[in-house]
Each structure stands twice: as C-alpha cells, then as structure tokens.
Image (tube, rainbow, N blue to C red):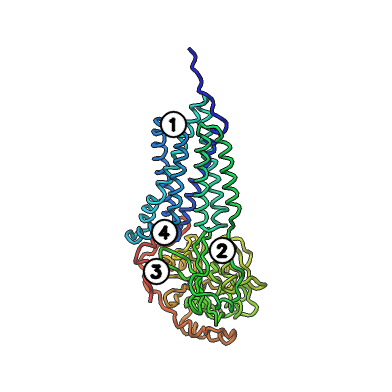
C-alpha cells in the first residue's frame, strides 16, 4: 500500500518557517559580535575574550539543538518558534540594561581576565544562543511534516541559517557597530526580534486572515522605525566655546574599537577610553591654555627631541588620542611635517571637534592601523612616536620585534623612536627587552607615572653628552617645554630577569598583563 504524502504547507507558513531559520542565524551572529564588542572595554580584545565567547556560544547552540530537537517531536507547533523569538527578545534587552552590572560584579570577584571573560560569557551569552539555536529543529520538523523531500528541506534550512549567520556577522561588524551606538543596536535588534516573533505566530496559525494581519503589523513596524533617526554628532567645537558647556559627560561613542568618553571638568576637557569601571586618560586640553600639554607623559615624550641634534623635519605618530602631542610638535618645530596613524575613526572625529586637531599641509591623519601605515608609507622619519592604547591594553602587533624592525627601517639616519609605556598595564620588562633587541640603545625617562622608552642606534649617550645636546637643541628650537629639564628624568633601567621577547609568532601579552612583576612601576 502506497504511503500517503503529508499535506503541503501553505505558502505563507512555509515562508515564515524558512525566514525563521534565516533570521535565527542572523540574530545569533549579530548578538555574538555585539557582546564581543561590549566585552572589550572590560576584558580587552584579547584572544581569551573571543575564545571564551565563541566557546560559550557553541555550547549554548549545542544545548539548543538537542533540547529543541527533542521538544519538537512532542510539540510540533509553529507557535513554539514564535515563543523562542519572544524569549530571545528579553535576553537581548538584558545586555543594555544589566550587562554592565553583571560584568562588573564578575570582575570584582575574579581577577584573572581569562576566567572572568568566560564566566561573563556564560552569564550573558549561553541562554540567547540556546534559544535561537532551538529554532532550527522546529523549522525543519514542521516543514518535513508537509514535504517528502527531507534531504532537500534539511539542506535548505541549514543553508538559510548559515546565510543569516554570514549576513549577521558582516552586517554587524562592517556596518551597524561602526555606524551606531551599541545600546541603540541592542534595542533595534530586540525590537526586530519581537516583531519577527509576532509575524511567525500570525503566519503559522491556521486561521483565516492571518496573512493580512501580518502585513498590517509589518507596515506598522516599518512606519514606526522610519520616524526614528540616529542623532548626529555635535558640530565642531572651537576650544573657547567649550567653556560654555556644562561639566560632566559631553559625549560617549561606542566605536568598533573602543568605548570613548569626552568629559569636561572645570577648565579641562578630557578624552577617555572606558575599561571596567575606570576611565583611562587618552588626552586632555586646557580651555584657558589650549597649547599646553597638561597630561604629564606627553611632555616627556617630547624629550626624545634631545637625542637627535639635527633638526626634526618629518614625524610619525601611531595613536592620535586627542592629538595634543603632535599639535605641540608641529607648532613648535617650524617646517616639520607629521603623519599620524589612528585606527579608530571615532577618535579622529572627537579630536577634531573637541581638541583642536585638524588636518593641514603639515599634519596628515591616516585612519588606519599603525603597523599597516608603517608598512605602506614610503617616507622616512626623524622621529617616530608610539602611543597606541585601547584603555589599558596595547595591540600586541604594535609591541613585537617585527614591528620595531619595521619602525627602524622607516627611520632616517640618526632617527629616534619614543614609546609611551604605562607600566601598570604594558608589561614593562618585555616591552623594554623587545625594543632593545632591535635598537642599539634604549633609554628610560620616568614620566610622572608613565615611562618613555627612547630607542636609537649607535653608542649610548652619556648624561653629559645628552645634557649638552639638549641645550643646543633647546637654544635652536626654543621649545615651550625645556628639553634640559625634561631629560633630568632619565634613569637607568637596571637588571631585568629573563624577559619575554615578543614576536609575531609568540606575544603572550594577555597573560603578561596579569603577572604582577611585569607591571611594577619603575622609579
């Protein structure tokens, strides 16, 4: 006796289930990218952070596939798919409302960032991953009830889920995060997920008029979304106009790389990168004295000028911040031309609008990774300044032996490189040893909390030689911050026990960051 084929699904119901498979993949990967970006200000963009998050998402998806597969055999109803999306909406909304509190509570209890990131991922990512993964088995079973070609249906559902994952990954990382604030993206994603829950519920119910109702709901949602807009940044701010602004937070930007804050406190406007509950100062400007270098280490970075007797004509800076140091040098050294490599376009924008940093014939800003810039440029430089931080973290590829060799290749004869080191965050021992493996000499200048490492070729300058050179350069260039005073902060490095030389092949900066002896301040 021939087997009776299952009845064909209605076109609307079939479309809803296929769309659910696609959308679940999209939301899963969009959420993974967004949670990963949310984690960076707290755990850093390290391999541990992403490894923990990816592992937890895979665990959650595995649980979702298993439980969803078992449950659909007992309750093969389309309304369960709608319920899964409905519940996912609240797990998405959990992040902007309570995610920061959960992360900070974990960080208060767990010092090791690897395990803290893993616990935070379990707390915030496992449940939404499981709920969204359970959608797939339901879609497959419900479609198989109505079709005989199980292989075709299974392949199509898998392909749609994967296509949604690809679009969610690329769309979120390439467009949404660079273009909008993180909280806005969470709210929009939650709203769209809720909307999709309603649509699936209406289209999979065996009631007349469901399709018309779904279309009406869709039109209403589109109309509601079209009335909203993304607020544009404030117009460019003249430094004198900043005095009229109220104290406190002026702007917060969630870029694709950093969570950036601009705050005003009295006469000072500061640029900060957020990490945990801290604000790391990247730059600051005095409204009454806009040419002053009020962040101490920036003054000591200019001490590198004393190590080169010939005039500095070409400067490169990796890491813009607010641009105060490079502005000072361009203004203080007539004829000097500077190239700046800054990865984060949001930082460039804020530097222009709040910190009086503007491109000109003598100041060129390149929005790209510092190492890529150094590789591509055909220029050679008399002075290279390295000051690229993401809060407490330095991108590891800007600390390796290969990178310092690349910098050395771009130095003119007698050229100098100066590296800002915040010793509580940048594994001083290894940073110094790696730099010293490339340059003949690496001197240390204590910069009131930070350290400036100055690398150069040839014999080491004695204190007397350096003082004499600083006096000659100061007399010639008449710098606002006297080089003769700045070089008095030069100190001997002393003995370093078995430091790790950082290379592209082996640069364990994440683990070095957690080792106390690598983070001791040098006096």
Pointer 4 local density, CA inside 10 Å: few below 14, some 14–19, many at least 20 = some
Which secondary structure lies at badge 1? loop
Pointer 1 local density, CA inside 10 Å: few below 14, some 14–19, many at least 20 = some
Q: Distance between the Cα atoms at labels 3 and 1?
A: 57 Å
Q: Distance between the Cα atoms at labels 4 and 1?
A: 38 Å
Q: Quadrant of residue 233?
A: bottom right
Q: Residue furthest left?
A: 109
What residue is rendered at 63% in x and 73% in y?
337
Q: Is residue 491 above or below residue 50?
A: below
Identify the residue under disc 4: 100
Q: Is residue 292 above or below residue 215?
A: below
Q: Answer with mark 4 or mark 1, whichever residue precedes in sequence.
A: 1
Q: Is residue 359 above or below residue 507?
A: below
Q: Answer with mark 3 or mark 4, whichever residue precedes in sequence.
A: 4
Residue 346 — which label? 2
Q: Distance between the Cα atoms at labels 4 and 2?
A: 22 Å
Q: Nearer the viewer, mark 3 or mark 1?
A: 1
Q: Quadrant of residue 512?
A: bottom left
Q: Nearer the viewer, mark 4 or mark 1?
A: 1
Q: Answer with mark 3 or mark 1, whichever residue precedes in sequence.
A: 1
Identify the residue under disc 3: 424
Q: Answer with mark 2 or mark 3, whichever residue precedes in sequence.
A: 2
Residue 481: percent from left, percent from top: 53, 83
Q: Answer with mark 4 or mark 2, whichever residue precedes in sequence.
A: 4
Residue 344: percent from left, percent from top: 55, 62
The answer to whether residue 512 is seen in the rendering is yes
Which secondary structure lies at badge 4? helix
Residue 149: percent from left, percent from top: 52, 25
Q: Distance between the Cα atoms at labels 2 and 1?
A: 48 Å
Whether pointer 4 and pointer 2 mark residues with C-beta atoms closer than 8 Å, the reply is no
Residue 307: percent from left, percent from top: 52, 78
Q: Nearer the viewer, mark 4 or mark 2?
A: 4
């Amino acid at each position: 006796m021939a087997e009776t084929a299952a009845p064909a699904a209605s076109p609307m119901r079939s479309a809803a289930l296929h769309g659910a498979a696609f959308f679940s993949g999209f939301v899963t990967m969009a959420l993974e990218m967004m949670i990963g970006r949310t984690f960076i200000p707290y755990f850093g963009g390290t391999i541990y952070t992403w490894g923990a998050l990816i592992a937890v998402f895979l665990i959650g998806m595995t649980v979702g596939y298993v439980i969803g597969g078992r449950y659909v055999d007992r309750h093969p109803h389309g309304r369960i798919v709608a319920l899964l999306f409905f519940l996912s909406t609240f797990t998405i909304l959990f992040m902007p409302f309570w995610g920061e509190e959960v992360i900070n509570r974990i960080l208060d209890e767990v010092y090791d960032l690897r395990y803290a990131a893993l616990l935070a991922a379990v707390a915030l990512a496992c449940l939404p991953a499981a709920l969204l993964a359970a959608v797939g088995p339901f879609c497959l079973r419900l479609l198989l009830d109505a079709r005989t070609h199980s292989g075709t249906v299974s392949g199509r559902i898998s392909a749609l889920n994967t296509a949604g994952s690809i679009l969610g990954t690329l769309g979120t990382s390439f467009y949404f995060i660079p273009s909008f604030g993180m909280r806005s993206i969470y709210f929009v994603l939650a709203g769209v997920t809720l909307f999709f829950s309603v649509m699936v519920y209406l289209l999979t119910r065996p009631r007349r008029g469901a399709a018309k109702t779904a279309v009406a709901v869709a039109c209403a949602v589109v109309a509601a979304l079209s009335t909203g807009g993304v607020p544009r940044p404030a117009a460019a701010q003249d430094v004198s106009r900043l005095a009229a602004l109220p104290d406190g937070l002026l702007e917060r930007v969630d870029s694709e790389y950093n969570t950036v804050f601009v705050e005003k406190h009295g006469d000072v406007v500061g640029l900060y990168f957020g990490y945990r509950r801290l604000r790391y100062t990247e730059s600051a400007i005095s409204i009454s004295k806009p040419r002053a270098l009020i962040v101490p280490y920036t003054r000591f970075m200019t001490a590198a000028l004393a190590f080169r007797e010939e005039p500095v004509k070409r400067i490169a800076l990796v890491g813009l911040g607010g641009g105060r140091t490079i502005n000072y040098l361009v203004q203080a050294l007539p004829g000097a031309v500077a190239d700046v490599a800054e990865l984060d376009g949001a930082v460039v924008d804020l530097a222009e609008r709040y910190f009086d940093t503007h491109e000109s014939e003598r100041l060129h800003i390149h929005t790209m990774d510092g190492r890529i810039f150094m590789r591509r440029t055909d220029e050679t430089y008399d002075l290279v300044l390295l000051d690229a931080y993401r809060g407490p973290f330095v991108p590891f590829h800007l600390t390796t032996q290969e990178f310092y060799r690349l910098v050395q290749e771009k130095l003119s004869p007698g050229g100098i490189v100066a590296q800002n080191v915040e010793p509580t965050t940048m594994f001083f021992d290894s940073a110094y040893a790696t730099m010293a493996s490339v340059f003949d000499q690496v001197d240390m200048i204590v910069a009131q909390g930070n350290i400036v490492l100055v690398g150069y070729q040839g014999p080491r300058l004695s204190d007397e030689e350096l003082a004499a050179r600083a006096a000659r350069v100061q007399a010639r260039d008449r710098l606002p911050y006297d080089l003769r005073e700045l070089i008095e902060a030069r100190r001997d490095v002393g003995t370093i026990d078995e430091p790790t030389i950082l290379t592209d092949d082996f640069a364990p900066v994440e683990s070095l960051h957690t080792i106390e002896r690598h983070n001791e301040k040098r006096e």
